[in-house]
Image (cartoon, rainbow, N blue to C red):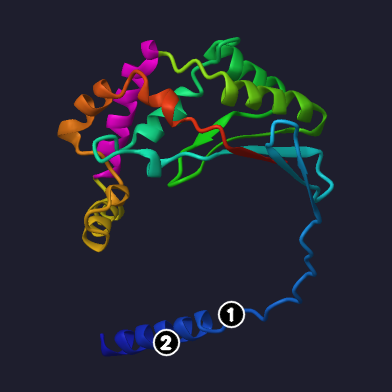
Amino acid sequence: MRTLAVIGILAATCFAQDREAPPPLGTPKAFALPAGETITLKNGMKVTLAQYGAVPLVSIKADLAFGKANESADQVWLSNLTMQLMREGTLTMSAAEVANEAARMGGQLETSPGTDQSSVSIDVLGEFAADAVKLIADVVQRPKLPESELERVRNDALRQLAVQLATPQAQASRHSPPICFRGIHMAACFPRKASSRDTESRTSGSSMPAMLGRNGRIYM
């Protein structure tokens, strides 16, 4: 038994030594940031174009000047719901038509809320770049924000909240910022479960459109 134990220790030691010797690093490849070109449209919106690589894909993102900074203390996650509802159709297209149009171009429309800046983005084949800009413009300028879909979107958010709060990372994010930034409503990363339904029922009407600022920027 002692012989087997000694052999096991020696084998483990050799294995550990092998793992401590990583392969030599290769020669770093040269990388240069692509030159960007920024133009200003007649309506004042700035568009930045940066060409990189040879793959015929275009990434388009519209940044909107609103987010958690525009929420009051009892409106936590209102920006999340607003961005999610922006995917539920426009005044000219239904939610299914928006999704089908994005799929036709080889992409999928994405909406992302942020602290003081939110975005609507899509990656499409290069030949559909102009159509993708039109689609994002329609979603940003003429969102339907249907109240008929609010209950479903809100329930989805509550389920997402329950799943997130079951993780240690979410618990840390929930309790740490209010301690570090006491008195600042933006420190609240998650809504209170007891008040989330009442909060959204109070803000389901005019508050969502009011969050959509006029300032924005498009990146391609």
Q: Position of residue 185 (x, y in %)?
A: 27, 47
Q: Quadrant of residue 126?
A: top right
Q: Position of residue 208 (x, y in %)?
A: 40, 25
Q: Nearer the viewer, mark 2 or mark 1?
A: 1
Question: Which residues lie in the magenta part?
Answer: 147-165
Q: Is residue 12 above or below residue 61?
A: below
- Give the residue drawn at x 52%, y 40%: 65
Judging depth in this view, the residue of 13 and 122 nearest the camera is 122
Q: Where is mark 2, residue-wise?
A: 13
Is residue 160 positioned above or below 128 on the image?
Answer: below
- Which of the two residues, 145 or 173, is positioned nearer the viewer here? 145
Q: Amino acid at mark 1?
A: Pro
- Given the image, on which type of amino acid does mark 2 rest? Thr
Place of residue 117 in the rendered image (x, y in percent of width and height, measured from the top left): 50, 44
Residue shown at the point (26%, 54%) measured from the top left: 168
Q: Residue at x 29, y 52 (%)?
A: 187
Image check: 31 left or right of 6?
right
Q: Which mark is residue 177?
A: none
